[in-house]
Image (tube, rainbow, N blue to C red):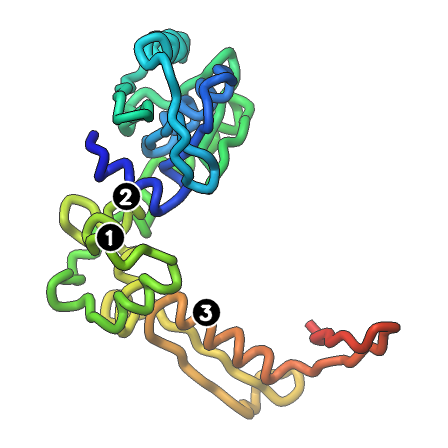
Amino acid sequence: MTINEIKTIIALGEGFSSEFKKSASDKKSIGREICAFANATGGVLLIGVADDGEIVGVDHHNKLKSEIQSIVRSIEPPLVAETYSIESLVAIVVPSQNAKPYSYAGKFYLRDGTSSQQLSRNEIREFFFKEGVIHFDEKNCNSFVLDTDLTERAWSKFQKTARIPTSMPLKDALSNLHLLKQGEMTNAGAWLLCEDIKKYNISGGVICALFMGTTKLHILDRVEFAGDIYGIFEEVSKYLFSKLNTELIITGTGRDERLEL
């Protein structure tokens, strides 16, 4: 792992596969995060980085790395994790594991968004039973050709929305967000960065309709939305807001607006 890779992770912030710790004082917390990454798809734990991305560094790297290895060895069943000294930081890299579920100190943890949650063994067994196949959004989208299908307009829009630094290479950003795997765009990446979602999945669009009464016999208005999935969400929201009645509620400081649904 290089300092440039570390900077890329820090620039993207904490997420499903990255966690920052200002210090290594809470060893139980480190064990919990390693266990949670192992039960998910792997991840990187950076020690010496504050939650806001400020690099504060840590001392006594050799001692710390020895303590981390002790924590890793205490996780059941045994797993693989690597520790690196990168300038003033210590990085713990947890690759994707094959013997899930893992437990630390008799407890099971799973990565959920930007945090790690404790689960009972039955909950985590049920979770991985349901996850026996790869999520649709994690599969490669074979019909999306990165060099031709990803337009400058789509990337610029996504880059701004996701707050990706302009200096970060496109493929590095997509890989760190798990939208690009082995050089191929995933379905999640294709749906987020496409010009027309229906090119990659014919049922990917959304149709909204307004009916007279409750019988669904007379259509007053019907609109079909395409584009990328985030854009569809925004347009559908606008459509719903424009069709729903709004109640104005007078308060002591002015008025509030409340939709009927």
User: Would you say 150 lies left or right of 223 here?
Assistant: left
The disc placed on residue 233 is 3
Say if mark 2 contacts mark 1, CB within 8 Å.
Answer: yes
Which quarter shows the C terminus? bottom right
Which quarter shows the N terminus? top left
Instruction: State whether residue 76 appears in this view.
Output: no
* Residue at figure coordinates x 65%, y 81% from the top left: 244
Name the residue at the left extreme: 147
The picture places residue 179, in percent across and down from the top left corner, at 27, 51
Residue picked out by circle 1:
168
* Residue at figure coordinates x 26%, y 21% from the top left: 84
**First reached walking from the N terminus: tag 3 or tag 2:** 2
Disc 3 versus disc 2: nearer the observer: 2
Q: Amino acid at mark 1?
A: Met
Q: Amino acid at mark 3?
A: Phe
Eyeballing the image, is 151 above or below 84? below
Image quarter of residue 79: top left
Disc 3 versus disc 1: nearer the observer: 1
**Label 3 – label 1 distance at C-alpha:** 27 Å
Residue picked out by circle 2:
8
Local SS, label 1:
loop
The picture places residue 97, in percent across and down from the top left corner, at 29, 25
* Residue at figure coordinates x 38%, y 26% from the top left: 57
The picture places residue 101, in percent across and down from the top left corner, at 40, 22
Eyeballing the image, is 232 above or below 126? below
